Image (cartoon, rainbow, N blue to C red):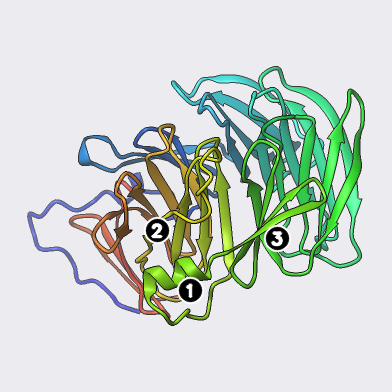
Amino acid sequence: MSTLNEPPPNKKVANFEEISKPILGFRSPLFLGHEKVIAIADNCLRYVDLSNYGSNIEDIDFEAPITSIAMSQDFMYLVLCVDLPRGAMLITKTAEGFETLTSFPARSTPIKMFFSFTNEVLVALALDDNAKTAILNCYGPVEGSFLGETEISTKNSSKNWEISVCPADETVICLKSDEIAYLLRRTSDEILIFSSIKLFDISCHAWADDVTLAFGTNDGQIRLYRETVPLKNVDLKPLHQSLLGSDVPSGTKVVSMYATDEILLVAVEIGIVYVFGSPENPERWKNSKAIVITSLLKSTTCLGLHLDPSNDHLLYTDHESSWICDLRYSEAVCKEGMRLVLAKHSHPIKYFSIDPESGIFASVDTSGLLIVTSLWTR
């Protein structure tokens, strides 16, 4: 472990009593608006202002772990779950101004949340300790009302549970486990399964349009369904070939998807994000923009995708970092075109050092990743 010498005389030394908070990683970054990003940092909500070519970072401490956050589709509302000692609370804030509208108890502590397109329903997903039982709770996020609850148990535990709400009908919810996609309907007092799709190689999902579900597969396809009826398989290999050459590399698994009413984002394991345009375009699946991701480490995986209110900027997140990329270019290989927003270690830290004069903290992990942090701004 490295050590530091005493600072030279007459040199100003950082007052470390004023820097009492730990240096935290981050998870679940989302756009809060244009040039504004938020992320969970343990008990804090990290706010990053990217305007004026700067990166001002502020940590808002909620004094208890934040388990999940969700942004409404129109960027009007933000909901976060704070796991207080007396029980988990859901807090609804305005995205503009960050004012608290309401706070109310969560029936279960959610790990994921999803807004309906009208903002009238928030679906919250909690799991049991074995990840075999999914607990769905529906709330009115603005008024803080409880709308319904159900539990669904599976034979095997799932590594990746996902939830979404149908864009055309906010009473229809999709719950995806590793093996089954459940379609549920919420009535005034019940949430009931009305259909299900047995899966065998599905990795993630999103709504491709108002009524069509898109499932990403482990072998690099997008499978389109309308309820339980298969419509089409979109093979991404031709897109890989046109971008990378005749040889299709290994690692074509679809690892993340995100959709708005105008765009479908599809991330594959080898570090490419495909941007499919409007559902109204009959050539949608033949043409797409491609973003080649150059991240901090080669052997990393996309954990999340998000778009800003204009659908012009992509927020890409993997195990070590979060980046912003401008989608207005026709084709992008983003070695120079991506802007780093946040970085963290995903491997054990091997060495670190602090400069007391400037408050600069440098750390190296076992993968060789070096991160230099200002203790004043995190």
Within the image, what quadrant is residue 215 found in? bottom right
What is the number of the mark on residue 347? 1
Q: Amino acid at mark 1?
A: His
Where, quadrant-wise, is the N terminus in this rendering? Answer: bottom left
Q: CA distance from mark 3 to mark 1?
A: 22 Å
Q: Residue 205: percent from the left, percent from the top?
A: 66, 53
| Image position of 245 with respect to 173: above or below | below
Lower position in the chain sequence, tag 1 or tag 2:
2
Lower position in the chain sequence, tag 3 or tag 1:
3
| Image position of 141 with respect to 61: above or below | above
Is any part of residue 28 visible from this angle? no
Residue marked by disc 2: 290
Q: Residue 139: percent from the left, percent from the top?
A: 76, 28
Is any part of residue 179 visible from this angle? yes
Residue at screen point 49% across, 56% down: 286
Which secondary structure lies at badge 2? strand
Residue at screen point 34% across, 66% down: 294
Lower position in the chain sequence, tag 2 or tag 3:
3
In this view, the mark in front (1 or 2)? 2
Q: Nearer the viewer, residue 32 or 274?
A: 274
Q: Amino acid at mark 2?
A: Ala
Residue marked by disc 3: 160
